[in-house]
Amino acid sequence: MNKQFQAFGKKLFGVRYERLARSVFVCLIIFFGLRSLDFSFPLAPPVLPLAVSVFTAGVLWQALSSEDNAANLQNLFMLPFSRRMFLFSYISAMGAYTLLTKTAPLFAILLALLHWSLSEIFVCILCSVNAILTTAVLFSQRTKWYAYVCWATAIILAAKNPWFLPIELVIMPLLLQTADNYVFYFTLEPRCPQKNTRRHSVRRYLFRYLLAHKNYLLNTVLLWTVAWVLPLFFRQLEGSFLLSIGFAMLSFNTPLSILLSCDPALERAVRFLPGQKKAFFLPYCLLLFAGSLIADTIFLCSWQIRFGGITWLPLLTAVLFALQSAILSVLLESFFPIRDWKIESDLWHHPRKYLVPLLLLLLAVLIGTKTESVLFLGVMLLCELCWFFLRR
């Protein structure tokens, strides 16, 4: 096996590639667990390869954009290497990481819930490989706007017309061979200019951090867009808990809820910061609360425009759910930060990100929008705040 591939592979999969065995074990649990439910639903044929292609392309783009990955590349660029061998090793390792640890669980879910033929499985696998090659080519040409148009067109054509796959699987490697190795060394854009101030400000730091990580802002804007269209999916459903379920679903904001986990240096600084609960975690909690509350407000405005019937009780429920989401996310970051990750893509797809939305979803089903239940939620929030800020 090529030594450069080993260098990338051991970083992504572990020294003894133990993450591969873990991923296979998780996929088997997901497949047999869902298969035992004896539940399936039909889906249009072009949707399956398109969903797999888009998911694979998105995960690979996150992996290629990882800051931690850039530090590893910087060390390798100091050594002599073959340009073609480097491209083959790097893209193969990142592609294998994407397929075997991220796309494989999606395959397990789809295989368990849908009726597939062998030809459809083979086409979806080829679409995943094509998505990897196409995304790698786009990443090497990411400064050119027309590359994004070609990227989207190539993925859609390959998903809807399988006979395009052999053509793209030949063209994409040829285009990738012309790429410069150093374009894969991804660094963040220069941060916004800083003014000398005599007083520290965590709010100013968080603002600058978000400006430097624009993908966090993009994810938040997409979540607000989902909040606007979410009432359309509840149109044919009935129940007093639908609004609460919407609030729980809109708490699914991964990037903002892992600020400490994705920056170990910041976490160490916060641990040594005197009065850390008031100095850092309170502004951080307010940031998460503001983001969730804006999403819930957009959701309620969309609901009022389409269906009406919004009273003071759903408004209070939205505030309490947003506050509960912020507090739980801060508690997890404070006491259980994620530390066993290899690249930033692991953080974005870590199982811990499902804990807060699932807990809020269960809470939404239990309490609905009843007055007594909402008051109980408010009392529970007050107890959590007192315990966190009064705990020594």
Image (tube, rainbow, N blue to C red):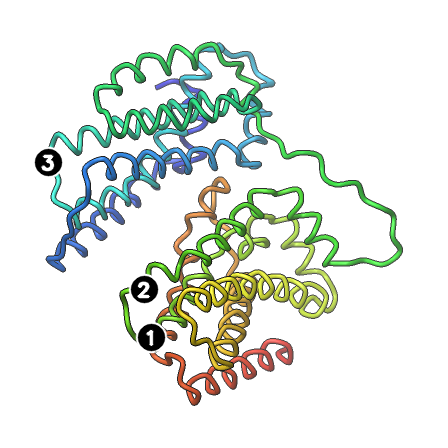
Residue 157 vs residue 33, the one in the foreground? 157
User: How far separated are the C-alphas under marks 3 and 2?
Assistant: 34 Å
Q: Amino acid at mark 2?
A: Arg
Q: Quadrant of residue 361?
A: bottom left
- Mark 3 Cα within 10 Å, few/some/many (few <14, many 20+)? few
Residue 184 vs residue 116, the one in the foreground? 116
According to the picture, the residue beneath numbered tag 2 turns out to be: 235
User: How far separated are the C-alphas under marks 1 and 3?
Assistant: 37 Å
Seen from this angle, which residue lies furthest bottom? 372
Residue 357 point in image, percent of width and height? 41, 64
The C terminus sits in image quarter: bottom right
Q: Residue at x 85, y 46 (%)?
A: 195
According to the picture, the residue beneath numbered tag 1 turns out to be: 365
Q: Secondary structure at mark 3?
A: loop
Q: Amino acid at mark 1?
A: Val
Residue 45 vs residue 237, the one in the foreground? 237
Residue 12 vs residue 84, the one in the foreground? 84
Residue 180 point in image, percent of width and height? 53, 14
According to the picture, the residue beneath numbered tag 3 turns out to be: 117
Q: Which of pointers 3 and 2 indicates the residue nearer the eye?
A: 2
Residue 362 to residue 261: above or below = below
First reached walking from the N terminus: tag 1 or tag 3:
3
Residue 266 to residue 2: above or below = below
Task: Specify whether 283 is left or right of 156.
Answer: right
First reached walking from the N terminus: tag 2 or tag 1:
2
User: How far separated are the C-alphas under marks 2 and 1?
Assistant: 18 Å
Q: Amino acid at mark 3?
A: Ser
